Image (tube, rainbow, N blue to C red):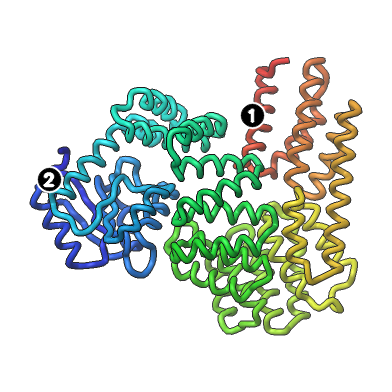
Amino acid sequence: MFFDDKTTVLIIEDSLTVRQGLRTMLSMAGITRTDAVASAAEGRARLKGRKFDVVLCDYNLGDGMDGQELLEALRKTGTLPLSTIWIMITGERKYERVVAAAEMAPDDYILKPFNSNLLLARMDSAYKRKIFLAPAHSYLERGNAGEAITTLQHLITTAPSPLNRIDANRLCAELLVTEGRQSEALHIYQELLENKVIPWAKMGVARIQADQGMQGESSELLREIIQDAPLYTDAYDLLAQNLIDEGQYLQAVAVLEKAVAISPRNFHRLKSCGTAALRSGDPEKAARYLQSAVEYGRNNNFFGPEILVDLLQAYSETGNTQPIDRLQAEISTCLGDRPEAQFTLMTCKSLTALAQCRSEDGLGWLRQAAQELLKPYVNFESAQRFLGALVRVPETLPDKEQLASWTRTITMRFAYSRHELSILLEIARKHPDCSNLIEQAYAELQEQSNKAVELTTEGRAAEAGRMLHEMAMRLYNERTGMNACAILLRVREQLSKKNQDCSEYDQMLHEILDWLPRDNERVQGLLNRLHAQNDGTVKN
């Protein structure tokens, strides 16, 4: 057994008696460097500032996150080191079903009551499993996912036990997905499923299907997972996201509510449920879920002003004006000096004025916000909130040209596909004029995009590239910008092969790439292609 007087242990347990009992058990084995906290929030704070060898966490932690939700949050944010052993302690037999389906599983779990010998034996077993994966963990901690995958592929073939082999397969498949090697990950999941029905392996297949745009197939598989493992909350989350992607907000809310009933304090789930309810036209339900998300999520790394803005919108649409001024002040503090601060605050002020029946003031704030609709920092979510306020302004106030201009700008900038179109139409469903304007703008966008495709097919790629460049710089539509870059790169490559001047196309490329999001995978591919051309490494 590796544990000694240098081993550090964090105990997360809301019962003082149990905390003291665990410390006594550990000290009897010579483990004296223990720290103990009473809640998930305290545990999270302690783990941010210090690395522990072992975490012993109770599943039920009273108010706030439970142990499973805490583990998932820590692993998703990278707060928990890969080398740390996490053992869940629970008195609930049903946790066996939870951990069997969990996508973020602990290294081991132990059912109450137990003695010190059983606890130490579980810790020793978890340590041996962790040591087996340590070579891959070492590469991951250095940011080298490729070498970690190669190491895991070797470990799979040399695993001393079926459990070690499954551990290596699971981590390897997860890394392959994050590295964009879905087909290899799919092979691992399918091979595992040939031998045994493993919920998390099925979940891996469903995720890959969803990423590849196969929402229907993914949703069908997710329903099978939920039927076989009804406590697998991640399956509900992905199913709801598939439904949202297809514009089925009411159905998504119904799915998320089932997941919330199982895991009622998960920040992301509450936020998703509230936002989906808001988009589906049920602001009262949205306010309930979003308020809960705010209460449970203030210490979450992903907590930001966006959820407060959605909550303000929900209150505005229900006519509940009491908390709005406080929320507006809190949003202002959260936004700080972020580039989108003024646009967001003006939208919030419009929503506040509309809730307080000050329609002309609401329209005035929208006029100011509208001046920033084409700024790079205004994203699709922000534009949705703007549109949500716009459709609530009495139809007698904005003139037709103003309404058409704002609606056209939003649609032509953000409606990349039928998916975004359905979201905008859902928001505008009670405003016929706005709905018609959205349809018209989308049809025009599609017509122009199809024209570019026709030009390219006819061998007039340079003309298509200039056309899409002009559209992209006028509309700031990311999809159009990426398509323009792809065509311009092709034209540039052909000119380079003939040793002809490429400066015109270089300028157009850089103008678009200056505002396209660098964290987008396709944009990274375009940049790599451009760099390869400049380096002369593109093969003809």
Q: Is residue 297 something one can see in this rendering? A: no
Res. 332 image quadrant: bottom right
Res. 469 image quadrant: top right
Question: Can you say whether 281 is above or below 478 in the image?
Answer: below
Q: Which residue is mark 1?
A: 528
State the image coordinates of residue 11 (x, y, percent, origin top left): 24, 57
Q: Which mark is residue 192?
A: none
State the image coordinates of residue 373 (x, y, percent, origin top left): 75, 59
The C terminus lies in which quarter of the figure? top right
Q: Amino acid type of disc 2? A: Asp
The N terminus lies in which quarter of the figure? top left
Q: Secondary structure at mark 1?
A: helix
Q: In screen coordinates, is 245 left or right of 293? A: right
Q: Secondary structure at mark 2?
A: loop
> Residue at 55% across / 78% down in the picture?
326
299 or 108, which lies in front? 108
Callout 2 touching callout 1 (CB < 8 Å) = no
* Separation (CA) of disc 2 from disc 1: 51 Å
Q: Amino acid type of disc 1? A: Asn
The crowding category of the residue bearing disc 2, from other C-alpha atoms within 10 Å (few below 14, some 14 to 19, many at least 20), is few
Q: Which residue is mark 2?
A: 5
286 or 252, which lies in front? 252
> Residue at 47% across / 66% down in the picture?
261
> Residue at 68% across / 65% down in the picture?
385
State the image coordinates of residue 199 (x, y, percent, origin top left): 46, 45
Question: Can you say whether 393 is above or below 406 in the image?
Answer: below
Q: Is residue 81 something one can see in this rendering? A: yes
First along the sequence among labels 2 and 1: 2
Q: In screen coordinates, is 354 left or right of 294? A: right
